[in-house]
Image: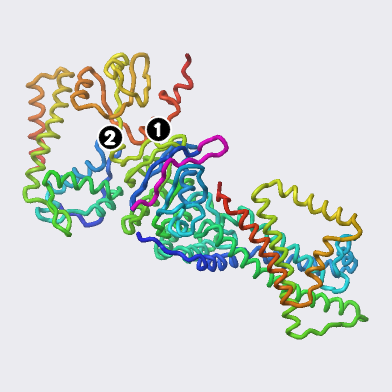
Amino acid sequence: MKVVECKNLTKQYGRVKAVNDLTFTLAENKITGLVGRNGAGKTTLLKMIAGYLHHNSGNIQVFSENPFNNLKVSANTIFIDNSMSFSPALTLGQLLETAGEFYVNWDKNLANRLFKYFSLNPDQSHVNLSKGNKSTFNMIIGLAAHCPLTIFDEPTSGMDAGTRKDFYRALLKDYIAHPRTIILSSHLLEEIEDILEDILLIKNGEKLLHISVAELKEYAIGITGKTDRINQWLSNRERIFTHEIGNDDSYVVIKNECSSSELEEAREIGMRISQVSTEDICMHLTSKSKGGIDHVFSRG
Amino acid sequence: MWYVGGDVRLILNSDSMKPIYVQIAEWLETEILIQAIQCDEKIYSQYQLAEMFNINPATAAKGINILAEENVLYKKRGLGMFVATDARHIILNKRKNTKLRAMVNELAKEAVQLQVNEEELVEMIRGMHQKLKGDQK
Amino acid sequence: MSLVEVNSWDIVKKQYRYKLKSYLGVFSSLIIIQVLAIFFSLNGTGMSGGSSGTFSYKVNYYSGDLILVFMMLWGFITAIIITTKAYRYDDTSFVTNRLTSHFSNILFLISASLFAGLTVFLSSHLFRLITNIMNVDSIMVNEHTPLQIAKGIIGAGLYIFLFTSIGYLVGMLIQKNKLFSFFLPIVLVGAMYLDGMNNDVLIFHSISLYFLSETLLSLLIIKIMSVSLLFYGFAIILSARMEVRA
């Protein structure tokens, strides 16, 4: 079953296209990472999926229905981000109870255990929580709701390293026990890639890649060596990223499409081949120019 | 060597050249080689592996599938994956032919670069090999 | 994971319960305003505030009227507050759509209005008691039967509810476009001014009379409910394409 289906989805703010001609589908019970730079359109996309925003053109279907202002989608989806607001009149304990009333699959036991584990105070009000604790509380609601579509938009902002780790582990364990469709957005890909199955990489509201993490790991290779030799060997191959080291050395990232004999040949002429981390691949693919930040400082 | 179920936590090397699922496959191979898992014994499920290594179950499944394709594991309908009778043999052969060969290749290259001659290199290997064997006894 | 089927009415009920608990601040402002109203009424001179030439409520007939006027204003402002982002977004943290959110708001405002109506009755009694103690000469008139009391509470509640509907519509207009918060007071004051200049037909006066002269409770209910629901309906239509956390 397709949980989310977007076709040529576009969302405009004035003349700026926050989401531009996006086409993809998310299959049931997968954890997908939504990755992109700041302002790439991640949050706008997630809010359209959650039914908060309407689109300008194209088509979006969640559980085969238009999600905007849709009660069925709302009941089966939970959208967790750090601007979630709760009434300041209710304590955290009361908020958990309320969440339990609204979400049919609510796992009260899990909610209470997590709440205790993270030493939250049930008599406190949501507005008085620190940024990190707010994220932690929201995350507990997101997990315990057991919604068939669970969306976390930058869920760990403000959390310390230990809490982040705990959260991702809790997410994975709960997912294994109760498989469901999860979308996780983050700019810290390194932190989440192990628990992801697929990655959706976007840039300027457009889709760059939608592949499995395993494929992404082998998507590109890095080559280091003398600039002129590299240029010769690469000839017309498309470069994802180029970085000059000193006067005549270069580090170039290319798509991993070379045969093993070609790579062997490259090694023979003194080039070093290295793997590129998924984080770096995404960074290079989404960077504004092929030379990265160095390009800004180069004269000429 | 026996593991206490559920508490095995091996830290996967995410900087390694190897994809996680290959590391999973190699870890399982090692478990079979050291006979932590016996022949015809049931191997960890993708979910157990996912929990143990904190990875997506699909990635864990991919690791299991590699071994199934190499006939190290076989499937019993509705019961899961089991270790093949000749699993150790297959793994040892594979490692000899790929891993060890590649390492020797690297070693030889380095030796050439450092201008270490053949006898010297072989002597180094022999010495190291004997030392390790001696340690094991 | 199998999908959950939902029923709108069920969600409205849950939201209504949630709002009764979480909009507590609304009731504390009610108490404060009532105390203020009683205080103003006790000054005696404060009574004249009701008749500024254009607004000729029959404030002087009935000693508790100022309290009712204050409560109508309270209803108006409370409804505006409920339409603001902070309140609307609280709904979206749980299961909702625009319609269930509106219905639970309306249910909440009906309850709040009736509660306010009850407190108007209670505090006007309190007020009369206080004046009675203060002015030894005065005589307490109007002995009420329980039925009359009930009618009085419902009537007061209805007037307050009418004002919540106006507030809700005004609030929604402002949410739609901030310019309304600037524009609407000008239109209102301007209209009242023009209305006052024209000595023949006082529109505001006749509108007030249309409701205030109604002696039959059942007709009053029909009159007020139909007008309020019209305002609410309009507010709902206005918000149909409104986005959340845009």
Going 36% across and 19% down the picture, which residue do you hit?
A245
Specify the amino acid type for callout 2.
Glu
Going 41% across and 24% down the picture, which residue do you hit?
A290
Kindly tell me whether residue C57 is visible in this rendering: yes
Kind of element beneath mark 2: loop
Residue B9 percent across, percent down from the top left = 26, 50
Q: Which mark is residue A76?
A: none
Q: What residue did someone put label 2 on?
A: A218
Crowding near the residue tagged with mark 2, few <14, some 14–19, many ≥20 C-alpha atoms within 10 Å: some
Q: Nearer the viewer, residue A162 or C205?
A: C205
In the image, the segment drawn in magenta is A1-17
Going 22% across and 41% down the picture, which residue do you hit?
B22
Q: Is residue B121 left or right of residue B48?
A: left
Q: What residue did someone put label 1 on?
A: A283
Residue A179 percent across, percent down from the top left = 33, 56
Q: On what subunit does the disc labeled 2 rest? A: A
State the residue lying farthest toward the front. Answer: C200
Tell me the chief SS of the magenta region.
strand
Residue A175 percent across, percent down from the top left = 34, 55
Residue B137, placed above or below residue C143: above
Residue A213 percent across, percent down from the top left = 31, 41
- Quadrant location of the C terminus of chain B in the rendered image: top left
Q: In this rendering, do the residues under marks 2 and 1 share a single chain?
A: yes
Instruction: Residue B24: name its quadrant.
Output: top left
